[in-house]
Image (cartoon, helix red, strand yellow):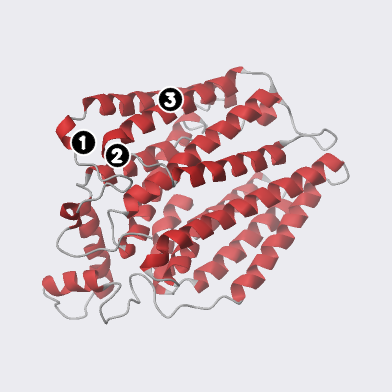
Amino acid sequence: AYRSLLVPIFLLSDYLRYKPVLVLQSLSHISIWLLLVLGTSVLTMQLMEFFYGVTMAARIAYSSYIFSLVSPSRYQRMASYSRSSILLGVFTSSVLGQLCVTSGAVSFLTLNYVSLGFVAFGLVLTLFLERPRRSLFFNRPREGGEGAELDQMASEEGGRGQKGWRDTTLCRMLKEVGALAGQPQLRLWSFWWVLNSAGYLHILWNEIYPTVDNRRVYNGGVDAASTLLGAGASFTAGYVKLRWTLWSELVMGVVTAFQAGLLLLMNTTSNIWLCYAAYVLFRSSHQFLVPIAIFQIATSLSKELCALVFGVNTFFATVLKTIITIIVADKRGLGLSVHPQFYVYFGYFTLLAVAYLLAAVGVPQGARGGGLGQGDVSSAHRGASPREEPG
């Protein structure tokens, strides 16, 4: 559902100027928890997963809405605020859930009711959001400024009437993305985004320490800890200054090899606390590279194309994740249980680490020279049209 709806919702959210899709996302989120509370069959849970796919795909409407409210000079700061609010929400919910479970007075069903109340309140907040007068693609201002670059491309292509202008807009965006794909850093970090995001992490906790209502579990606390450490790693990544044209592959390889080792550790240990610690480190190491990938990709693109490229990367990551899940976990494929699945994911991350490290060794020195510090973006890579640097 997520894969199928990602592109249509991306286009629809921009065309409708975000707010209707945000309302749809809130309604879908409420449907998830209603089905969790009231549903009792496998079919009901499959329907719940469909609404979860709608909710996940509609996240891009939230991100695009946030960026449509501010000028490009505030893009990086707004991205930081948006990401911090999400991490704060995860941390708060994890701590609250853990306290409720640890006290022993709250059942898991009650937690679902609490979650339903929060997402219902989220719908109320959504109704009070202001609907922007413009969006990134279909409702751009005509007078210079943002969107002028794509308008210039339209005039260069001949501007043959209004027929199919929406399709033409999308085609122009895709053509420019294809042209920009030749930039080494953009291509490299996009590949990392797709390949590493597709590494599905099935939680082992219930295999090692089964969860029941009368047993104290600390899953919420671990989620909270991993979120805080991940937020710290994301914050730290913003201050790491390297010649990324020289060190990107090496950093990717080392971090991915570390993740592969953590997967093997989680799969072989019978100690729940060791498994918890490995999960926290796994998630934090991924969060460390995410803002670096976002920055490296964003510095190669205009504001209008950032959302499109992130959407395309997410789409292909979801496609790859679906393929891996069907092969490894689905009954139509190998149908492996949880522990054998982890050996497959360990092998997957090991292959990725080897590929990154070989790339780090094999890239010619001439292709690495001329790094410009944190951004590593040259005016030659920008093309004839000026683009704004994020932040």
Report the residue at 74% width, 52% height from top.
112
If you read the primary sequence from the N terminus, does the residue marked by circle 1 or circle 2 appear first?
Answer: 2
If you read the primary sequence from the N terminus, does the residue marked by circle 3 or circle 2 appear first?
Answer: 2
Image quadrant in which you'd find residue 311 = bottom left
What is the x, y in percent for residue 58?
Answer: 50, 60
Residue 318 seen in the current view: no
Circle 2 residue: 243
Report the residue at 23% width, 63% height from top.
171
Query: In this rendering, is residue 144 above or below 377?
Result: below
Element class at badge 3: helix
What is the x, y in percent for residue 116?
Answer: 72, 59
Q: Is residue 305 left or right of residue 327?
A: left
Q: Which mark is residue 174?
A: none
Within 10 Å of the Cα at label 3, are there few (<14), some (14-19), or many (20+) other Cα atoms?
many
Within 10 Å of the Cα at label 2, are there few (<14), some (14-19), or many (20+) other Cα atoms?
some
How far apart, in angstroms, are the residues tagged by discs 3 and 2? Answer: 21 Å
Element class at badge 1: helix
Image quadrant in which you'd find residue 126 = bottom right
Toward the viewer: 337 or 188? 188
Report the residue at 71% width, 39% height from top.
221
Q: Report the mark closest to the observer, 3 or 2.
A: 2
Q: Report the mark closest to the observer, 3 or 1.
A: 1
Q: Is residue 202 left or right of residue 165?
A: right
Q: Amino acid at mark 3?
A: Ala
How far apart, in angstroms, are the residues tagged by discs 1 and 2? Answer: 9 Å
Query: In this rendering, is residue 158 above or below 193?
Result: below
Circle 1 residue: 368
- Residue lying at the far right in this picture: please name it: 105
Circle 3 residue: 257
If you read the primary sequence from the N terminus, does the residue marked by circle 3 or circle 1 appear first?
Answer: 3
